């Protein structure tokens, strides 16, 4: 049997704000509320369900979600981050703000959602 990721739940401080931030960066469809979740759908039909009431705010760990994007999509994401003065980094340790990486012959960056709990990574070349 093939295993396909269908959806994941990401804990955050404000589900609608975090979902809208990610959808805007990715030019994804408008997030949809499903009960206590707000879902962003990716181009490969994986739903990212943002939840803000399942875990107490002081117990939310920083989540990490990564996306493989085209060079054009990366350029658009980078332009939006710069235009809105949203911090980004070349590594998950969040050092060297405002830089991108060039790993494996591609480009990559990390940025946090507005609540500071979801670290989104965008890369143009798969690792390895």
Image (tube, rainbow, N blue to C red):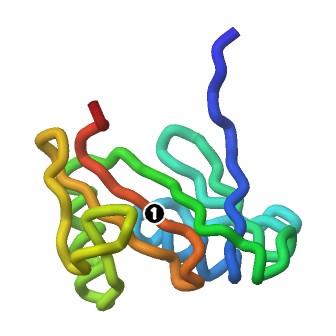
Asked whether, in this view, residue 37 is left or right of residue 4, the answer is right
* Image position of 123 (left or right of 53): left
Q: Quadrant of residue 45?
A: top right
Q: Quadrant of the C terminus?
A: top left
The residue that appears at 29% across and 68% down in the rendered structure is 77
As drawn, the residue found furthest toward the top would be 1
Q: Residue at x 53, y 61 (%)?
A: 29
> In this view of the protein, which residue sits in the foreground, 1 or 90?
90
Mark count: 1
Classify the position of the N terminus by image quarter: top right
Residue hosting label 1? 120
Neighbourhood count class around disc 1 (C-alpha, 10 Å): few under 14, some 14–19, many 20 upward = some
What x and y, as percent, mark residue 15? 70, 75
Element type where label 1 sits in the image = strand
- Compared to residue 24, the image places residue 34 above or below, namely above
Q: Position of residue 39 (x, y in %)?
A: 68, 60
Q: Report the front residue among 65 and 30.
A: 65
Asked whether, in this view, residue 58 is left or right of residue 80, the answer is right
In the figure, is residue 128 to the left or right of 54?
A: left
Q: Residue furthest bottom?
A: 85
Examine the rendered structure and indicate whether residue 128 appears above or below residue 98: above
Q: Is residue 8 above or below residue 74?
A: above
The residue positioned 30% from the left and 90% from the top of the image is 85
Q: Quadrant of residue 75?
A: bottom left
x, y (%) of residue 82? 24, 83
Of residue 89 and residue 39, the one placed in the foreground of this image is 89
Query: In the image, residue 32 lies at what x, y percent?
Result: 70, 65
């Amino acid at each position: 049997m093939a295993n396909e990721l269908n959806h994941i739940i990401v804990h955050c401080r404000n589900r609608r704000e975090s979902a809208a931030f990610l959808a805007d960066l990715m030019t994804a469809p408008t997030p949809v509320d499903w009960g206590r979740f707000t879902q962003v759908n990716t181009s490969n039909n994986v739903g990212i369900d943002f939840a803000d009431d399942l875990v107490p705010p002081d117990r939310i760990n920083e989540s990490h979600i990564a996306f493989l994007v085209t060079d054009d999509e990366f350029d658009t994401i980078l332009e939006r981050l710069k235009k809105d003065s949203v911090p980004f980094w070349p590594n998950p340790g969040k050092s060297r703000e405002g830089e991108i990486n060039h790993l494996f012959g591609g480009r990559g960056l990390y940025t946090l959602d507005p609540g500071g709990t979801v670290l989104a990574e965008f890369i143009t070349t798969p690792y390895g």
